[in-house]
Image (tube, coloured by chain):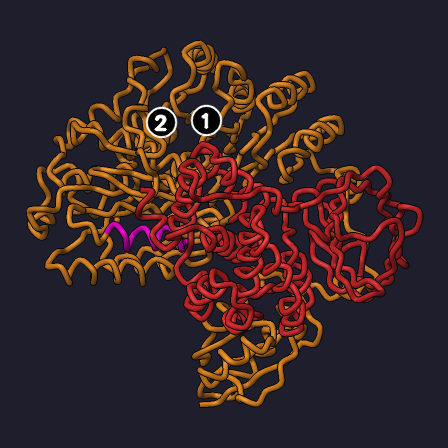
Amino acid sequence: MTTLSRVFPNFYRDSVSLMQLSAKLGALAGVEQAAAVMATKANLALLAETGLVREDTAPSPNNLLVVVRGADETQLEAALAEAKAALEARPSASTGEALPEKARSIEMALGEMPDANLALVSTPGEYAADEARKALNLGLHVMLFSDNVSLEEEISLKHRARGRDLLVMGPDCGTAIINGIPLGFANVVRRGDIGCVAASGTGLQQVTCLVDRYGAGISQAIGTGGRDLKAEVGGMTMLQGIAALTHDPATRVIVLISKPPAPTVADRVLGIAARSGKPVVVNFLGAAPEMVKREGVHAARTLEDAARLAVDLATGKAGGSRGRGNLRAGSARSPDAARLAPSQKYIRGLYSGGTFCYEASFLLTEALGTTVYSNTPVDKRAALPDVWTSREHTVVDLGDDLFTRGRPHPMIDHRLRNERILAEAADPGVAVLLLDVVLGYGAHPDPAAEMEPAIRSARDIATKHGREILFVGSVCGTAADPQDLSRQEAALRDAGVLLANSNAEAVRLAAAIVGGSRPAAQHRAEGGSRNG
Amino acid sequence: MLRLEALSIGSAVPRPAFDGIAQSVFRRACNIRTGDGELLALLTNDLADSPHGIRVAAPAGFDFQTHIGAGRTVSCRAGITRVAGSELSIDLSSARRWRGDVSRFSVDLTRPQSARAWVVARNELDKRLLPNALPVQVTRVVPRLMEAVREQCLHQTVRAFAPMIGCGEGLTPAGDDVLVGYLVGLWSAVGRDRQRLMFLAALSGPIETATQLTNDISCAYLKQAAHGFAGSHIVALARQIAVGAAAARVRSATGSAMAAGASSGPAGVYGLLMGMATWAPQAGRLKAETI
């Protein structure tokens, strides 16, 4: 075994970078152990205990020490070279040498790219509205990724945008695909003739991915921000989005996605949708189909149904678009249930996507006929008293602010969910762990690899207590995503996860396993009814 | 020319003049070593106030690294801080003075309201602390440290905290972060007890000596904590516990304090709570009894 080290004198990088570097080096081929720490006396003593440094190494607390250990010296040299490159990734910034001038304002950026017509604003919330206003004044559409923008500011920005015939997507708009370019957390989908407007980021990801999976494509996917359909905002961006898609010759079918809007807003949106002259599929998650019914407007109960209906309408091949599921969802109590102990009755959904969690919440409540607790419940009476502890049937949105304070979103950092997986596995009442995996730009580069050890450990925990725990999930992504859908799905299947083609299908399978499923035909009838 | 306005100046920042060198530069912070060897920090306004920090109103997307290179000369005259070779200057003239002194709080965990608030904070910490966030080499010495402080034995106290200094991952090693929180916790709960005040005053000497075992950035925080000064998130949490605030407020303050840095926040909160509990009778059973 060989150990190589390198000292970076008076070298400072923030803690997150150092920890990420340690983890990154440790995962490199040929590296069995790695550390990137300040060379304090205490840290050297710890490294000496594990043989990573000699005991007589002199401390130098202001120096950064990188140590790697493994069998092959060539690989270790390569690892140190990679560490050096990573640490010196911004040499000009840290040494004060001259930099090519970077755009430091929207005006400067526009000077460099005069044809740009959209600004993506992602700053702390307190500055975001001002930046968005500047962009609008410069004649740019705005994707406002930032959150913590007040409702008053949102209304003011959207009025200003509408007056200039511009769009404000957001605030807190995480996903859009404009002219084929994914923005924020979005997937690489093929281009086509289905246009979407959505007040839900993961909802938009699920529909666009399923459309791609069903062989069709997306013209535009416009995000509105989660509050757009509140009564105060009046659905301004959604209405503008419908109008834009109505006049877009490349769009043949329009899909609208949101949690149930304020009734007055719903009426206005559906009225405009009905007059668009194009088929419109509406998925107001959990809303009764009769609320949506209008001439030319098709109600979809689930995100999966929305995608399927849209593809059917676009291709004119009713029923032909639905991907064949690899599961027995919708059947009576699943044979998988035979693997469970009598005490195992409950489903625990651990979601990184807020809309997936919401969809699971209402679908499970319906299928099981009992309370499904959640931190983002459909019915406030089902609010989880302590979001850190599940009870009975529970679905948790781990992307909620409560969980992400001071941490990256669970689509990026899987640690929190992995811990929760282990905690749920120790609960003798748990039968099924229900998961979503989101691919695409912005998401973790290899989520399956992150989750797989936790899934196996959870299974071990259950096995030790004479139980078997079932994992059910779906992957929201496409073959063209950077993470490679088929590789992710294969890795998860290999870890024993029962994979569905959509979140709704995964939820139905989970319900079937614990014995709460209703006949598949009924789901199809509700979900796929055409009202137009 | 880019002139930024300072919003607040920590109590340890010398006024009206200082000279220094940019010691390390990050996106949202720039550390300056002054001529007398102390460290000051320029911070963007989204970071917490700090005893040795100058918080500036930075525009969206601002990055210190774009304006200041490590090793550049920084000087402050007549309330204006300038960086050699940079168009950046910072106007300190209208900034408020910020004093993160916790010794006025007199946290008393024998008061049921404060004890309840402490338990809420502790539960919040337990729930949100990632596994292995605190090195076992640090956490295992904390009970010994608490015992030594409770007995007001300076020798044993120094022996107990010595292994913590400079121990752990991160720019400011986790052992330092815990010790910073711990010292602040002790000061927040010292009240008017003369014996304890004298003990803490005596402890500041060995702490300052021990800071040479860690890096300059950690050292700056430890030196301030040794005198009962801390960053605004930790001060805010100490205040909520002192007044026995409602659980939601305590949870929110704990969350904000934990959000600082990668591991510094959780480590500091852990230290703070242990420091506060040190002076409380039967502190070891505090959590179980109060629940």
Image location of residue A190, percent across then percent down: 46, 43
Image location of residue A513, percent across then percent down: 14, 43
Q: Nearer the viewer, residue B79 or A528?
A: B79
Classify mark 1: helix, strand or loop: loop
Q: Quadrant of the N terminus of chain A?
A: bottom left
Q: Nearer the viewer, residue A468 or A167?
A: A468
Image location of residue B123, percent across then percent down: 38, 46
Q: Which residue is mark 1?
A: A252
Name the residue at 77% across, 54% down: B66
Name the residue at 76% across, 39% down: B7
Q: Can you say whether A425 is above or below A174 in the image?
A: below
Classify mark 2: helix, strand or loop: helix
**For residue A121, which numbered disc appears in the image?**
none
Which class describes the residues within 10 Å of circle 1: few (<14), some (14-19), or many (20+)? many
For the colour red, the matching chain is: B
Q: Quadrant of residue B206?
A: bottom right
Name the residue at 31% across, 29% down: A383
Q: Amino acid at mark 2?
A: Leu
Residue contact between numbered discs 1 and 2, judged by CB atoms under 8 Å: yes
Q: Amino acid at mark 1?
A: Arg
Q: Residue furthest front?
A: B194
Q: Quadrant of the C terminus of chain A?
A: top left
Q: Distance from label 1 to label 2 (Cα)?
A: 9 Å
The span shown in magenta is: A414-424
**For residue A313, which numbered disc appears in the image?**
2
Image location of residue A470, percent across then percent down: 19, 51
